[in-house]
Every structure is written in structure tokens, then in C-alpha cells.
Amino acid sequence: MSKRIRIKTTAYGPPWDSMEGGGITSTGVKLRAGQQKLVVAVDPTVIPYGTKLKIPGNPFGDDNLIFTAADTGGAFQGGTNKVDFFVAGKGNETNHDRLNNWGVKDLTAIIVGKGSPRDVALLGSGSAMTVNKAKQKSNAQAIGKLTKSTVETQQFDRAAYDQAVRKSAVASMLTKSNPKSLLLTTGALSTTPPDPSQFTSTVAKEVMKYKAPAATAAAASVKATAPRPSGTKYGHLEIAPGASNGKHTQEPWRKFVREVAGAWGKPMVATTTTNHNQYTTSGNVSEHYEGNAGDFGIGEDIRGGGNAVGARKGDEMAAHAIAIAGRMSYSAAMKLAKAGGIHNFNTPLGRVQIIWRVDGAQNGGNHFNHVHIGVNPSR
Ligand SMILES: [Zn+2]
């Protein structure tokens, strides 16, 4: 018996190295560059882990291959019929092209069975039943660390914001016709446009894991080992309520963020610091959890086009951070910020990482609603 479902497919692959070390899926399957395991990432609420699928038209050119649903990521939240093929690109020319040329394709998947998510076939081996006992044990330990946990995300109250916009428009009209109106003089109505950040709140959300971002999207990496210039201006860092789990951030991160705030001339408001999943996909402790990273929310996802204020705010924060970490001009940094990506810099404070305007499991999820800044003194 088999069931068919329409799916939207994408492809992902190594390297993860510059971000979080090796790759381990959310179910504990170890993925390596050059070793083609037939793993797909799914939304486990739509396609449960361990589901065996045939996907005619898959990137490997053999319609009879059996893929195992054994991974997920931030992009899979909310019940999507999305399937992301793992393609072990690095060190293999053919796979490298498969990975880069795949894009998005609509295909039909045939569910052919259900088994362990760790029974994964290797391309060419023809079997989905080759996992040794020792590996199973260490994988099980990894899974233990990667159970469901809660992260906080930003939510924008569009209705209330729209109402506030209408109110200020009414006030502007009234200013022209009747500037002495009690509605204006008593402050019941104001012509000041509403601030979108006032309509943004933090909500807790259950997720499977925090997927390690890959440094593939327009990543920039430069050495910036020169000492910090004297006369560096430090601004203010604010930690929003609920951003931390009670654990404090580390001094190098705070110092860097305060330097960004100084250059920007506005306080940097961290909306998530340590209140984040403890582990990444690779089983490493997340930089957030260690106090070496923070997210700076800018309200609603900027891709809708309704959050121009947030887009500008995010661009400015990211550009100042890139300019400082990369020792480059603000205008050059702004170009990188607007292009979007994961930007890594070796600095005297440690490895500084700025993530902005990227999405997808490979990039650690949606970064169109916040700027991520990490400062890891041990990297
Ligand atoms: Zn983050």
C-alpha cells in the first residue's frame, strides 16, 4: 500500500563547518560532506520521522531510491508539504552541481513504508538498513538532547497597528480643518505616526530544534585582527523582558553590541539572548545559550513589504555591526547587509557573526525579522 503526496522540494548540504561543526540531523543521523546518505528534511507533523519515501524526479536520477525522513528545520514550521533533499555536495563535483542547480521543484512523493529515522540508505548501497549498534547508541544520546523546546519569536499586531495608523491620519486631517479641536489639544488624537515596535510582542513557540545555519549564503569572512581604535564610542545595550532565561550574556558580546550601538547612535535592544534552544542540530551548545549571541527583533517579517521601518532598522544594525567587525566603510557594509547573508569575521573579541536577510533551514531559519549577532571568544 502506498500513499502519494504533492511536495515542494529544495536541496541542502554541507558545509556547516564554519558555523556549528559537523552536521547531525534532528533525529541524530550524522551527515558528512562527500557521503551521500538518502536523507530528506521534512515537517514531522506532515511526514513523520522514519517515513520511507520514493521521490521520482529526485536530484540523484534514480526514481527507485528510498529516502528517509530524518531531519527538519526552522523553515518547516507550520505544517508545510516541503521536502529538503540532503545533497552531500562538497568533495563531489556531480553532487555539488546537483545542490547548486536544484532550486525549488514540485514533485510527488510516494510513501512506501515506515521505519527508524536512523535506518538511512547510502547512495549506491541500495539498502536502508545499515546502522551499527555503537552509532545507534551515540545517536540516541544526541536525540535525548534534541527534544522539543520552546523559543521565543516576535509577533506583530497588524490590526492594532493599522488602527493606530488610521487614527494618526484622522488627526492629520483634523489639524488642517480644525487645529483647535479638543481631540487634538487634549492629546486624545495625535498626528505622530505609530511606532511598529510598540505593536511587537514576544511569543513562546514550541520547535523541534534550532538548525545550524550554513555559511553558504553570501558569507563574507575577513581577518580583522587589528586592535580596536582608541576613542571607540560605546552606546547602550538593552535586554528586552523575556529575552534571557536568567543566564547572562558574555562580556565580549556585550562589548561588541555596545560598540554597534555607539556607532548607530541608538540603543541596541536584544529581543532574544539566552532564552533559546540549548542545542544546535550538531548537538553543540548554542551560542545563544552560552550567552555569546543575541537577536535584535525589528518587528514583522520585512518580505511582506509592510515593515519598511523595520527593514531600515535591520539594515542599519547589520551594517554597523559588519562595518565594525570587518573594519570596512559603512557604505560597503551596508551593501553586504542589504544583500543578506551570514557574515563571519575574525576579530580581537573572537569570531563575530552577523546573520540578516536570509531564510531556510541551512541559514538557521528566518532572519528577515531579526538581526542575529554572535561573538564567540573561543573561535
Ligand atoms: Zn539568533
Image (tube, rainbow, N blue to C red):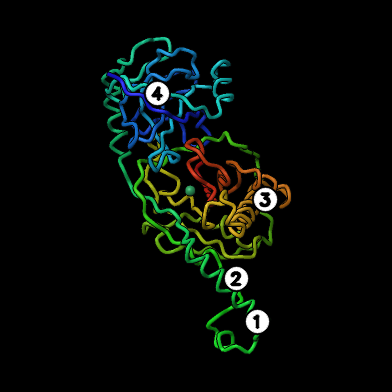
Q: Which mark is residue 323?
A: 3
Mark 2 vs mark 4, foreground winner is 4
Q: Are marks 2 and 1 in contact (CB under 8 Å)?
A: no
Disc 2 to disc 1, C-alpha distance: 14 Å
Q: Which residue is mark 1?
A: 175
Q: Which quadrant of the structure image shows residue 248? A: bottom left
Crowd around label 2: few <14 · some 14–19 · many ≥20 (10 Å) = some
Mark 3 vs mark 2, foreground winner is 2
Quarter of the image with the N terminus is top left
Front-most of residues 226 and 139: 139
Disc 1 to disc 4, C-alpha distance: 61 Å
Residue at the image point whose x is 32% and y is 23% from the top: 3
Find residue 60 and report its horizontal and vertical position in percent. Answer: 49, 16
Find residue 190 and report its horizontal and vertical position in percent. Answer: 58, 78
Q: Which SS class for mark 1?
A: helix
Find residue 208 and report its horizontal and vertical position in percent. Answer: 35, 41
Front-most of residues 92 and 45: 45
Q: Which residue is mark 4?
A: 109
Q: Which residue is mark 2?
A: 193
Mark 3 vs mark 1, foreground winner is 1
**Residue 344 in sight here:** no
